[in-house]
Amino acid sequence: MFASDVAGPGFVPPSTNDFNLPPVFGDSAYTTKPILLVLLSVVLISIFFIAAARKAAIVPGKLQFVGESIYAFVRKDLAEEIIGHGFLQFVPFLFTLFTFVLVNNIFGIIPFLQFPAMSHVAFPYVLAGFSYFIFHAIGIKKQGLGKYLKGIAFLPGVPKFAYILLTPIEIATYFLIRPVTLSLRLFANMFAGHLLLLVFIGGGDYMLHDSHLFMKILSPFSFGFGIAMTFFEFMVQCLQAYIITLLSALFIAGALVDEH
């Protein structure tokens, strides 16, 4: 329901209140639409890839071909190309991250679902937290805690006086800016995209039911922009799933090198 449905005269544009959805059933905060969509995505992803791999053949069928294409894309373009030697152990995480984010993003343009779960910032925060923990754990395991922290705080080949400025920046970058930007980039894109769709579709509906003929004439243009934005949003949804996986792979690759 749009804000305009319950407001007085005049079009009231959608706001953050349209993202705070009530429980689908009961009174629990764990039965809201975003939570149920995340659970649905896990079920759908599991069923799809189990079905795709169940009757694997040398000449793949359509389902197997799609499943293998997605896996090959993540394995080669996002793991092997970025991380290099030893990339295989990180493929399961990157593959899970990519498919999970992609499906939850695409929910935003699926009829009757029409809500991107990643527009609730808590989900991107948790995903960024996984990446944050993994790349730091890798760096500490490979180099040892002392050497790893020293490599972050004191860049090699830099004049000592420059550490006064660079050390706080590097520490903030690795321990604060990276996880925050990783999560907020995904959240902001999904939030803004869904808000724009609400504006165009809600505005078109308002103009269509307006008493003025001129507003009724303009309503198809609003709906048309809404349809165009849906296709654009699909590209953004795919791109954001790619970007968060790419950046996670880059952070892992950076943790594996001896010098930062």
Image (cartoon, grey):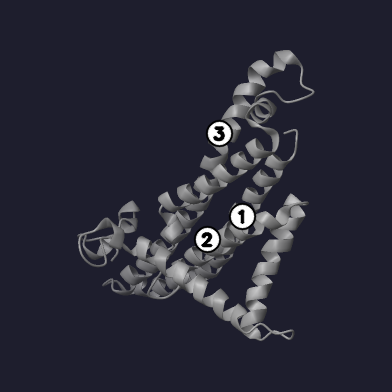
User: Mark 3 or 2 closer to N-term?
Assistant: 2
The circle on residue 175 is 3
Q: CA distance from mark 3 to mark 2?
A: 23 Å
* Quarter in which the C terminus is drawn: top right
Q: Is residue 259 visible?
A: yes
- Residue flagged by tag 2: what amino acid is it? Val
Horizontal arrangement in the rendering, residue 81 relative to residue 141 (left or right): right
Going by the numbered disc 3, the residue's amino acid type is: Phe
Residue drawn at 52 percent across, 52 percent down: 186
| Residue holding disc 1 | 245
Other residues around mark 1 within 10 Å, as few (<14) / some (14–19) / many (≥20): many
Give the residue drawn at x 36%, y 61%. Answer: 35
- Report the front residue among 236 and 86: 86
Against 124, is 54 above or below? below
User: Residue 198: x and y, percent?
Assistant: 39, 63
Where residue 237 sits in the image (x, y, percent)? 54, 62
Q: Is residue 66 left or right of residue 82?
A: left
Q: Residues within 10 Å of mark 2 (few under 14, many from 20)?
A: many
Name the residue carrying label 2: 101
Tag 1–tag 2 contact (CB < 8 Å): yes
| Mark 3 element type | helix
- In the visual, does 44 lie left or right of 207? right
Q: Is 147 in front, or is 26?
A: 147
- Determine the CA span between mark 1 and mark 2: 9 Å
- Res 208 quadrant in image: bottom left
